[in-house]
Structure formats: C-alpha cells, structure tokens
Image (cartoon, rainbow, N blue to C red):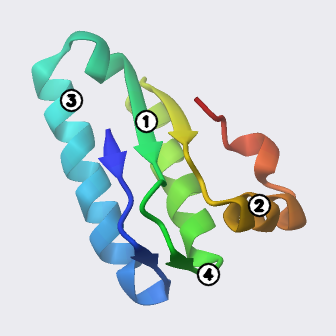
Amino acid sequence: MLLLPAVITHAEVPHVLRLFRQTLDQAAAQGGTEAAMLTVDGAALQQFDSSALAVLLECQRMARANGRAFAVQHLPPKLTELARLYGVDGLLQSA
C-alpha cells in the first residue's frame, strides 16, 4: 500500500512517483496478494493541487502496465470533487 503524504503539489510529484515505483517493485518481489492489488491511501493528504490527480493517474497507469489492479481509498472530499470537475473521477477506483 502506498500512503500518500500530507502535501502533494507540483514540487512533490517526482518524490511521490518514486515512492510508488519502489512500492510496486517491492510488491512484485514479494508476490502474493500485495502483488495483485496495489492500493493508494489518501487519508493523510491535506494540501494538494491538481498535481495530486496526475500522480494518482500515473500510479494507476504504472500498476496496470505491470499487470496489477489499482485502487484508491480515503481520498479527501475536495480531491474527489476536483477529479469530478476534471472528468477523471470514473478513472479512479475506490476500495
């Protein structure tokens, strides 16, 4: 599981994507159910801009490219609203 940090703005994108890549690689090495489903938990996310959506969509793309299911949980309501505004809410599955 990838726990999102408290802040995701444009400046944090490379770091968060690097963390996700590490999580993806670790899950692949371990096998089992963690390798089949990767979940992003947004419970800690407090400050964000539209970059957070870009991060989530890129994480989803990377997971699927590696043959893994992807889900998000505990996204802040304002981020869910932002996703709906941009028309990408249907692309993000919730667990």
Which of discs 3 and 2 lies nearer the camera? The answer is 2
Q: Would residue 46 be seen by someone viewing this image from the given angle?
A: yes
Residue under the image location 39 percent in, 59 percent down: 4
Residue under the image location 27 percent in, 39 percent down: 24
Q: Residue 37's x, y, as percent?
A: 41, 23
Name which quarter of the figure residue 29 lies in.
top left
Q: Quadrant of the C terminus?
A: top right
Mark 3 to mark 4: distance in Å? 28 Å
Q: Which mark is residue 31?
A: none
Q: Which mark is residue 39?
A: 1
Identify the residue position indicated by label 3 in the image. Answer: 27
Q: Specify which label sits upstream in the sequence, 2 or 4.
A: 4
Name which quarter of the figure residue 27 lies in.
top left
Q: Is residue 81 above or below residue 21?
A: below
Q: Residue 64's x, y, as percent?
A: 49, 33
Q: Amino acid at mark 1?
A: Thr
Closer-to-camera residue (46/61):
46
